[in-house]
Image (cartoon, rainbow, N blue to C red):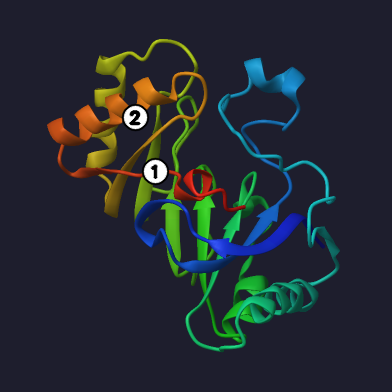
């Protein structure tokens, strides 16, 4: 059984794959926050801007097996584009690795999808995922230490950022085996200041690149 908040087609808005046509499958549930506002202040991740609770989103529901979910994802892609090439799927959440397994991966590869995940990195991913994006959260135990990209949101709370603490985290991540390193400014009332901070850190530590949430800038889902 897979429990899905929503399935929708759009363009990837962040990171190295930004601008690419994709289907997003958002699983319900997360291991770092319940998704309820009353729990946010005590959660490990306090800045999430996504609703991943329930199954009431577009295309959401409970899917009894891998083939039924893979068919729903494939149908969403085919509504956007009838091509069987360049099919790109992003599993997100919440935390997608609470549900994603090798059976579902195999079913989607049989339908010619390249499979990406956006994960907090606290759960070891199954084999044969094509693109792994890790977004670490302060206070969590990171077990996924390699992948295609790492995307670190700064700061990690709504307080005035501590530059020394951020740089210590960046130095730690720089030792890990990722192809792309991105800094992304946290959304919210201090977004302009956070973007400026990310820009200055990218200048100071040029391994890192700036990631903007393009989908928000151009009002995509």
Q: Where in the figure is residue 120, as x and y percent of width and height? A: 51, 42
Tell me what residue is drawn at x 25 percent, y 16 percent: 164
Judged from the image, the secondary structure of the residue bearing numbered disc 1 is: loop
Tell me what residue is drawn at x 24 percent, y 32 percent: 199
Bin the neighbour count of mark 2 within 10 Å (Cα to Cα): few under 14, some 14-19, many 20 and up. many
Q: Where in the figure is residue 47, as x and y percent of width and height? A: 56, 27
Q: Where in the figure is residue 211, as x and y percent of width and height? A: 35, 44
User: Is any atom of residue 176 visible in this view?
Assistant: yes
Residue 187 placement, left or right of 41? left
Residue 99 placement, left or right of 218? right
User: Is any atom of residue 124 visible in this view?
Assistant: no
Bin the neighbour count of mark 1 within 10 Å (Cα to Cα): few under 14, some 14-19, many 20 and up. some
Q: Nearer the viewer, residue 218 or 160?
A: 218
User: Is the residue under label 1 in contact with that under label 2 (CB below 8 Å)?
Assistant: yes
Q: Is residue 218 above or below residue 70?
A: above
- What is the residue that sits farthest to the front in this orientation? 218
Q: Quadrant of residue 171?
A: top left
- Tag 1 or tag 2, which sits nearer the N-term? 2
User: Total marks drawn?
Assistant: 2
Judged from the image, the secondary structure of the residue bearing numbered disc 2 is: helix
Residue 107 placement, left or right of 182? right
Q: Which residue is mark 1?
A: 212
Q: Quadrant of the N terminus?
A: bottom right
Q: Report, in whole angstroms, how far the alpha carbon at label 2 lies from the one at label 1.
A: 9 Å
- What is the residue that sits farthest to the top in this orientation? 160
Tell me what residue is drawn at x 49 percent, y 59 percent: 12
Q: Is residue 112 above or below residue 77?
A: below
**Which mark is drawn over residue 72?**
none
Q: Where in the figure is residue 59, as x and y percent of width and height? A: 79, 62
Q: Nearer the viewer, residue 220 or 162?
A: 220
Q: Nearer the viewer, residue 116 or 66?
A: 116
Q: Which residue is mark 2?
A: 195
């Amino acid at each position: 059984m897979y429990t899905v908040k929503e399935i929708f087609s759009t363009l990837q808005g962040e990171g190295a794959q930004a601008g690419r046509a994709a289907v997003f499958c958002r699983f319900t549930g997360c291991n770092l926050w319940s998704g309820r506002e009353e729990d946010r202040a005590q959660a490990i991740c306090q800045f999430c801007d996504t609703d991943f609770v329930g199954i009431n989103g577009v295309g959401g529901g409970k899917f009894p097996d891998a083939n039924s979910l893979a068919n729903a994802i494939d149908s969403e892609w085919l509504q956007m584009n009838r091509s069987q090439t360049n099919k790109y799927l992003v599993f997100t959440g919440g935390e997608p690795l609470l549900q994603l397994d090798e059976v579902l991966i195999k079913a989607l590869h049989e339908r010619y999808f390249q499979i990406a995940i956006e994960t907090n990195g606290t759960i070891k991913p199954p084999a044969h995922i094509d693109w792994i994006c890790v977004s670490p959260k302060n206070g969590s135990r990171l077990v996924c230490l390699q992948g295609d990209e790492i995307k670190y949101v700064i700061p990690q709370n709504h307080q005035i950022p501590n530059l020394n603490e951020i740089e210590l985290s960046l130095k730690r991540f720089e030792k890990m085996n990722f192809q792309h390193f991105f800094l992304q400014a946290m959304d919210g009332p201090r977004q302009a200041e956070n973007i400026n901070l990310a820009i200055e850190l990218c200048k100071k530590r040029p391994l890192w690149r700036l990631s903007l949430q393009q989908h928000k800038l151009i009002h995509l889902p």
